[in-house]
């Protein structure tokens, strides 16, 4: 059973990104609690700064990424890709063009408004090799040992149960499959009062795990060849994004890669670890 704190974090994140999907909040904005003495809002579009422009459906790029997970993934034609926390679908649409008609892309997001928006874009722009599923990212609605590549862009930091995210990511990957994500990490432990501020958690700030913690989560899940590379050019963005709270020295964006080892015949005996929840949709 989820703790009350985990439920509060999920509710805050779902409400925030639902509002972004409906364009009620600026993209990737930092809105600290009023107790911190500021009413300002800084809008940062990561994808405008850290990635190359790309031809995707209008409105699918909400500026919520922290790097270029598509370039990191080095996708090949025919691969099956899973995007953890797919948002408006921008990285799914980019991936779909690279894997081609013989490949397939699944986007998973826990925010109904985001999934609706992404599905509408897929239908209007005719992306037959893309599908969006509604679920919490700790319980991926995907068959075990079925995915070649997992991508994710500035989402896993929002989870209060990062170990479960990586455990389930490991389950759904084929043996030899790879993880290629961009996310916010902490270069040193964040202050306790910052970590307790739900508005900062939902702003991709207070939920960041340290680099060592991320490495341990991946190792405990079973991943090998773990590589976490901080993106130095992101420091300036955090200087703007930290809203005068002095947190820029704690945070950096990082490219994170890892491989699932093993033999497929052994992995098939493990079965699926997927657990449906109130925000899930069926899957094949």
Image (tube, grey):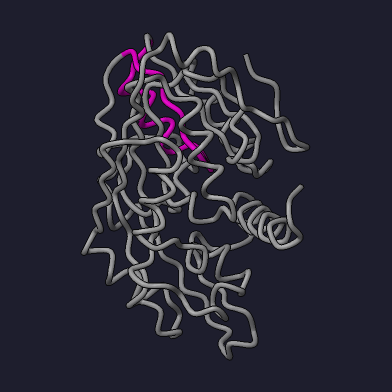
Q: Is residue 240 left or right of residue 84?
A: left
User: Camera-side residue: 125 or 141?
Assistant: 141
Residue 141 in magenta stretch: no
x and y, in percent, of residue 117 in the image: 60, 38
> Looking at the image, which is closer to me, 158 or 125?
158
Q: Residue at x 69, y 41 (%)?
A: 112
Quadrant of res 177 = top left
Give 176 or 53, whichever is nearer the viewer.
Answer: 176
Q: Quadrant of residue 45?
A: bottom left
Q: Nearer the viewer, residue 128 or 154?
A: 154
Q: Which residue is situated farthest in the bottom direction here? A: 37
Query: What residue sits 33% from the left and 41% below the top?
Result: 69
- State the count of labels: 0
* Membership of 88 in magenta stretch: yes
Q: Relative to 256, is 271 above or below?
A: above
Q: Seen from this angle, which residue lies furthest left?
A: 232
- Residue 40, image x and y in percent? 53, 82
Q: Quadrant of the C terminus?
A: top right
In the image, residue 35 lies at what x, y percent?
A: 64, 87
Q: Which residues are magenta?
A: 78-101
């Amino acid at each position: 059973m989820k703790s009350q704190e985990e439920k509060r974090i999920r509710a805050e994140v779902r409400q925030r990104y639902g509002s972004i999907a409906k364009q009620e909040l600026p993209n990737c904005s930092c809105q600290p609690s009023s107790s911190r003495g500021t009413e300002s809002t800084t809008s940062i579009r990561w994808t405008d700064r850290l990635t190359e422009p790309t031809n995707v459906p209008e409105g699918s790029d909400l500026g919520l990424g922290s790097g270029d997970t598509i370039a990191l993934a080095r996708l090949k034609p025919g691969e099956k890709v899973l995007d953890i926390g797919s948002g408006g679908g921008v990285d799914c649409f980019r991936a779909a063009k690279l894997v081609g008609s013989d490949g397939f892309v699944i986007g998973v997001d826990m925010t109904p408004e985001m999934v609706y928006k992404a599905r509408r874009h897929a239908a209007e722009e005719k992306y037959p090799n893309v599908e969006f599923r509604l679920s919490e990212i700790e319980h991926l609605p995907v068959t075990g040992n079925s995915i070649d590549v997992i991508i994710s862009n500035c989402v896993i930091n929002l989870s209060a149960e990062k170990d479960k995210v990586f455990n389930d990511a490991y389950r759904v990957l084929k043996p030899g499959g790879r993880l290629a994500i961009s996310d916010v990490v902490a270069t040193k432990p964040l202050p306790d009062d910052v970590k307790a501020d739900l508005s900062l958690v939902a702003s991709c700030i207070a939920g960041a795990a340290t680099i060592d913690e991320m490495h341990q989560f991946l190792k405990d899940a079973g991943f090998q060849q773990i590589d976490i590379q901080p993106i130095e050019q992101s420091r300036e963005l955090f200087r703007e994004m930290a809203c005068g709270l002095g947190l820029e020295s704690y945070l950096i964006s990082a490219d994170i890669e890892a491989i699932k080892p093993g033999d497929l015949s052994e992995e098939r005996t493990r079965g699926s670890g997927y657990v449906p929840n109130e925000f899930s949709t069926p899957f094949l």
